Image (cartoon, helix red, strand yellow):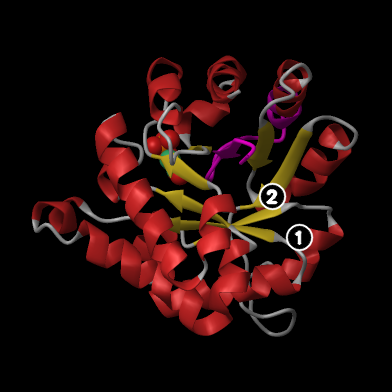
Amino acid sequence: MRQPLVAGNWKMNGSREGVGELLDGIARGAAGLDKVEVAVCPPAIFIPEAQARLAGTRVVWGGQDVSVHASGAYTGEISGPMLSDFACTYAIVGHSERRTYHGESDTLVAQKFVAARKAGLVPIFCIGETLEEREQGVTEQVVAGQVDAVLALGGAQLLGEGVIAYEPVWAIGTGRTATPEQAQEVHAFIRSRVAVSDAEGAGSIRILYGGSMKPDNAAELMAQADIDGGLIGGASLKPSDFLAICQAAG
Ligand code: PEP
């Protein structure tokens, strides 16, 4: 039985003034949601605040990215050990915004997956196709390549220690959600791809859907057999919406 996970990706949003209210609101609302794991990934500068406010609540926290290096002369980077130092559970790796705006390749993302695990973090490993790729009919090839990069570098056991987030790039922040059938089809394919190297791991790995998940479409998406929760961008910035999605997962 896979426990659903709903993780909020705040991206580069939030302010010193508003962060406390947002964290407290989510923690309060999540208190009774015992069937779902709830996580938030604020910008790194707010992680100490997340730790201060969420420790002892049902909500865990994580980073939005992680360096492949543990320390050193890498200006602007945040390392896995630093995230662990602030009690992060998760680190998002390979978000499409990192792949698109920062040129992160499948190989680099796989290295980040490994770096996160080395620091004791659970990677939320984002994969997904662009609109162009979907229209060309190569969605399965694209996600297979992204998964295979982690398998090649770390092996099936390592992959199984993470969480996969299927996020069709055309659905992120666009208001255009994949239909439950479209999402389920790709999720089932991803699970079958993992099963090629690890049948047992494929049954237990959680595969989240991400891409304009909102309170009004969450239940139907998460009712699909291979959808084990959500990675939520925009809606994670409004506690009532985020909590409604968490409720739909449980
Ligand atoms: C995301 O950033 O991972 C995401 C899914 O964003 P949104 O929910 O806003 O589409």
Residue occupied by mark 2: 62
The reply to whether residue 75 is visible in this rendering is yes
Kindly state the secondary structure of the residue where label 1 is placed.
helix
Quarter for ligand 1?
Answer: top left
For this view, does 94 lie left or right of residue 59? left
What residue range appears in magenta? 1-22
* Residue drawn at x 52%, y 68% as measured from the top left: 198
Seen from this angle, which residue lies furthest left?
Answer: 136
Q: Is residue 190 above or below residue 196?
A: above
* Residue drawn at x 82%, y 34% as measured from the top left: 54
Kindly state the secondary structure of the residue where label 2 is placed.
strand
Amino acid identity at mark 1: Leu
* Residue drawn at x 55%, y 48% as measured from the top left: 206
Which x, y percent locates residue 16? Answer: 71, 35
Q: Number of callouts in the render?
A: 2
* Residue drawn at x 12%, y 57% as measured from the top left: 137
Q: Quadrant of residue 19?
A: top right
Seen from this angle, which residue lies furthest right?
Answer: 56
Q: Which mark is residue 99?
A: none
Which x, y percent locates residue 38? Answer: 67, 33
Residue occupied by mark 1: 83
Which x, y percent locates residue 200? Answer: 57, 60
Ligand 1 neighbours mark 1 (CB distance < 8 Å): no
Q: Are marks 2 and 1 in contact (CB under 8 Å)?
A: yes
In this rendered view, identify the residue nearer to me: 204 or 30: 204
